[in-house]
Amino acid sequence: MINRINPLIQVNPQMTEKVEPASKDPVTPFSEILKNALNQVETDIKTSNDLVKKVSTGDIQDLHQVMIATEKANLGLQLTVQVRNKIVEAYQEIMRMQV
């Protein structure tokens, strides 16, 4: 019994045009990605604080919305701390390298 594997991609031998990358946009620098992520975390924290203040004053009755915003801000902050820890760890590892 011979098992045949079906090809996932069919190759067309008559295909002669050159395949270009899907996007010609320049690559976004890591610093911009990091800055945008930090801005998003800051926005989430501010939103969470505003919602908590509104709940304490009685302006918002939906506690679920507040809890979701608070957890989103908490997870974003935890992720930021872990990324920072990894960056510091990588820096320390580079500093320990002997030249």
Image (spheres, grey):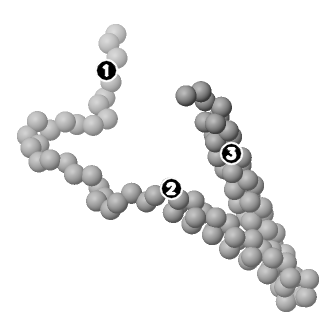
Circle 2 crowding by C-alpha within 10 Å: few under 14, some 14–19, many from 20: few
Kind of residue sitting beneath label 1: Arg
Mark 3–mark 1 distance (CA, rounded to whole Å): 50 Å
> Given the image, on which type of amino acid does mark 3 rest?
Val
Residue indicated by mark 1 = 4
Mark in the foreground, 1 or 2: 2
67 and 47: which is toward the camera: 47
- What residue is drawn where x is 71% and y is 46%? 85
Residue 16 located left or right of residue 79: left
Q: Secondary structure at mark 1?
A: loop
Name the residue carrying label 2. Answer: 30
> Residue at 64% across / 64% down in the picture?
38
Q: Is residue 33 left or right of residue 76?
A: left
Give above or below for 42 relative to 78: below
Residue at the far front: name it: 99
Q: Residues within 10 Å of mark 3 (few under 14, many from 20)?
A: few
Residue furthest to the top in view is 1
Is residue 82 shown left or right of residue 6?
Answer: right
Residue depth check, mark 2 versus mark 3: number of the one nearer the observer: 3
Q: Quadrant of the N terminus?
A: top left
Residue 12 percent coordinates (x, y): 14, 38
* Distance of label 2 from label 3 (alpha carbons): 16 Å
Task: Give whichever of discs 2 and 3 has the lower sequence position.
Answer: 2
The quarter holding residue 42 reads bottom right
Q: Disc 3 marks which residue?
A: 88
